[in-house]
Image (cartoon, rainbow, N blue to C red):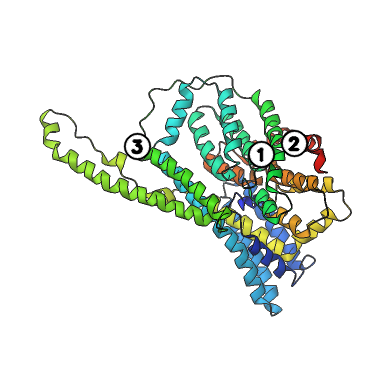
Amino acid sequence: MFSRILLLILLTCSPLTAWADAEQAAQALNLTKHWVGYLAIGIFAVAYLLAMTEEVTELNKSKPMVLAASLIWAFIAGIYVNNGMSEQAGHAFRACLEGYAELFLFIMVSMAYLNAMEDRGVFDNLRVWLLSKGFSYRKLFWITGIMSFFMSSVCNNLTTALLMGAVIAAMGKDNRKFVTLACINVVVATNAGGSFSPFGDITTLLVWQSGVVPFKDFYSLFIPAIVNFALPAIIMHFWIPKQQPAAVGKAPKMKRGAMTMIVLFLLTIITAVCFENMLKLPPAAGMLAGLTYLKFLGFYLQKTADKDNGKISDFAHVYKLFNVAVPDARPSQKFDVFKSVATLEWDTLLFFYGVMISVGGLSFIGYLTMASDVLYVGMDPTIANIVVGILSAFIDNGTIMFAVLTMHPDISQGQWLLVTLTAGVGGSLLAIGSAAGVGLMGQMKGLYTFSAHLKWMPVILIGFFGSIATHFLINGSYF
């Protein structure tokens, strides 16, 4: 819910210029002490509370958030129209919408690939392979966590979390406790892994593009990031069941095209990174190019499936002669890309819209600038940067980091690295604090919830402060 606005993230990186335009437009009218400003905060708080209590109310979290976004901007636009400034409000809203559109397209392609690979049996095979090794739940807990940590340094944290979540759900479907703790571990690991790589998270990407931290200096956060992940994992380790998952039989055969899909998914991620770093185009543009890879593969599978079925039907009389059932190749060969798109978690995607547009409205009102002024005027930079990290559990880390970069406080290189670290890993404190957490909540449907994550927040805080202490210990030369 404030939901790290979830994800702006995730690599989907709403354009810096779009946020700059929104911030510039916000200077036209300061509504922070106007009744519209107070009403906007109240609307957002109520919607946030309803979204948090989804399990109790059984009201999908997207409904209150989308309504809140609509109401906030309706009141803002009303004020601007009355003051003859309607174009500015419309321009600011479109800037926020552009950021969401990039996010939506990025996530859509990622989820489409994951759904397609699930349809082809990729995750079932990975589950069986891991289980066939005789790993206990505790070993599986560490394997999925470590894989998430390193994958998120090159992939966005949402894609990584969704991928590992599918594996965890398949491995621990008979052990709810393992699934819950493993998902918490994955959320912490993905956020930590993205905090030390210049392109691992929107926070680091914004800082890198602004030029305040050189490329190589980001990797000085590698050890603090490991501490952030490892300390909570070590503590949670003792609550993981000691049992081993039930024995499995022979691994199901993956459907035709499964391995090709994996290669194309990796190629899609590479394409998105290249579009961003080399061509200076939004990562979503690269992801959509990658979607065409999947569509062409689907076209090939459709055509060859028909041929396979035709060949089988030619020999149907032979199968009948020997009283053998005629094999049906079509179910295992046909593939429709649009079915993978249709099964996306639409409630989560619309929830993202509500959060991002709502917070964009609060920023346009002027509250984000006000918060930044409070943080860096008369407050010790270390305390301010820790507060930024805690706030990132509620408000999108990309938005907060953009506000900090806009203020450009006069702080040392070590402090810039500190705020990069805290803003990156602070979202792990709450399930709704990062795209990874929100995405997993939608994917797990009750196995991993806001309340379950909240119970372990004190343990995650140990890792949060442990990473800060480690940064001061080993990176003292930057201060």
Is the residue 112 above or below the residue 172 in the image? Answer: below
Residue sitting at 82 percent across and 51 percent down? Answer: 411
Alpha carbons under labels 3 and 1: distance apart: 34 Å
Discs 3, 1 touching: Cβ within 8 Å: no
222 or 367, nearer to the observer: 222
Secondary structure beneath disc 2?
A: helix
x, y percent for residue 7:
61, 50
The residue type indicated by label 3 comes to: Lys
The residue beneath circle 2 is 467
Q: Is residue 49 visible?
A: no
- Depth check, front residue: 182 or 253: 253
Q: CA distance from mark 2 to mark 1?
A: 10 Å
Q: Element type at marker 1?
A: helix
**Numbered disc 3: secondary structure:** loop
User: Which amino acid, mark 2?
Assistant: Ser
Residue 255 disc label: 3
Pinpoint residue 424: horizontal percent, then vertical percent: 69, 45
Crowding at mark 1 (Cα within 10 Å: few <14, some 14-19, many 20+) = many
Mark found first going from the N terminus, 2 or 1: 1
Pick out the residue farthest to the bottom: 84
Q: Are marks 2 and 1 in contact (CB under 8 Å)?
A: yes
Q: Amino acid at mark 1?
A: Ala
Give the residue at mark 1.
192
Q: How many marks?
A: 3
Query: Within 10 angstroms of label 3, few (less than 14), some, or many (20 or more) residues?
Result: some
Position of 370 with respect to 268 (left or right) is: right
In this rendering, would 30 be left or right of 431?
right
Image location of residue 414, percent across then percent down? 79, 44
Give above or below for 10 relative to 149: below
